[in-house]
Image (spheres, grey):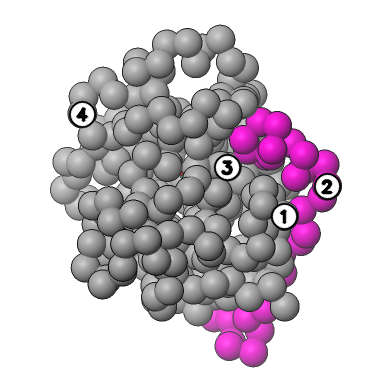
Amino acid sequence: MPMGVAALRAPVREVTDEEVARFREHGWAPLPGLVEPEFVAGLRERALDRLAGRRGRFRNGYVDRAFGQDRDIARHDEAFAALALSPRLGRNAIRLLTGVDAVRLQVTNLLVKEPAGGDGHGATVFHQDFPWMPMDRSAMLTVWLALDDVPADMGALRFYNGSHRYGSLGRSFVRDGDDALSNHPWLETLELSEPLDLAAGDATVHSALVIHGAPENRRDRPRLSFTATYFDAAALYTGAPYGQTDDLGLKVNEPFDHPRFPVVPTA
Ligand SMILES: O=C(O)CCC(=O)C(=O)O
Ligand SMILES: [Fe+2]
């Protein structure tokens, strides 16, 4: 049953002080039961509808080998929009980040990791998100929400705890063999987070500076997740080339005042 517009208040819980502390210490945190499973079931249905007919697309980019994307899904779907722009999620992002009074939504994404083998997806190599970004500061995070149960061997994310403290460590996904561990073997001295079994509605949240990746999907059904990325609303545009922002008419050294980067309401 499709959700009516009136029903679109996303049932998101608040993060706890312990979760904020853990995020700041490790650069990421598990957020079990972040979104009510009933609402997530509706999102899953919408996700599957959007994905029908998208199978078997040619893949060649480095990222495309790791997972499929339906970028900006919240611009096309009101339920994903209700979630991504929910005041609870906005307040959570502000609390998790340090020294941030307001956040903008950078991007939403429906991610699909097909089962490994044949035409399927490979592992998500370890990387940071920030090195691509045209923002002048790194206060940025991604909420990664399981739209269905995602047991560890299906490819829930893993993280190098504390790796967010080492600043921007360079791009991955741009050349062969450029995963973060190959670029920086010392990362292996850090603790790798345990494999996580996520249920639909569970999430992880990660800093754009934490090193993260995911194993291949060893199950026989696609791994389905939704991500929403938020950044400090005060961040200024640097003009660095980036597909999403190149043609938007943003001004260098000005904030991202553009409808593509809405400030998330907090009430
Ligand atoms: O879902 C994945 O495998 C990777 C997602 C990711 O890297 C991200 O959301 O930043
Ligand atoms: Fe990432």
Q: Is residue 78 above or below residue 73?
A: below
Name the quadrant containing residue 53: bottom left
- Give the residue type that dot 3 points to: His
Q: Look at the image and give the residue range highlighted in magenta.
A: 1-29
**How far, Cα to Cα, is label 3 from label 4?**
24 Å
Against 29, residue 215 (above or below) is: above
Q: Position of residue 65 (x, y in %)?
A: 27, 38
Q: Is residue 221 left or right of residue 232?
A: left
Tell me the tag on residue 206: 3
Q: Is mark 3 within 8 Å of ligand 1?
A: yes
Give the number of the disc on residue 95: 1
**Residue in front for this viewpoint, 139 or 162:** 139
Pick out the residue farthest to the right.
17
- Confirm or deny contact between disc 1 and disc 4 (CB under 8 A): no
Left or right placement of residue 141 versus residue 25 in this view: left
Q: Crowdedness of circle 2 by 10 Å Cα count: few (<14), some, many (20+)?
A: few
| In the depicted structure, whether residue 85 falls above or below residue 32 | below
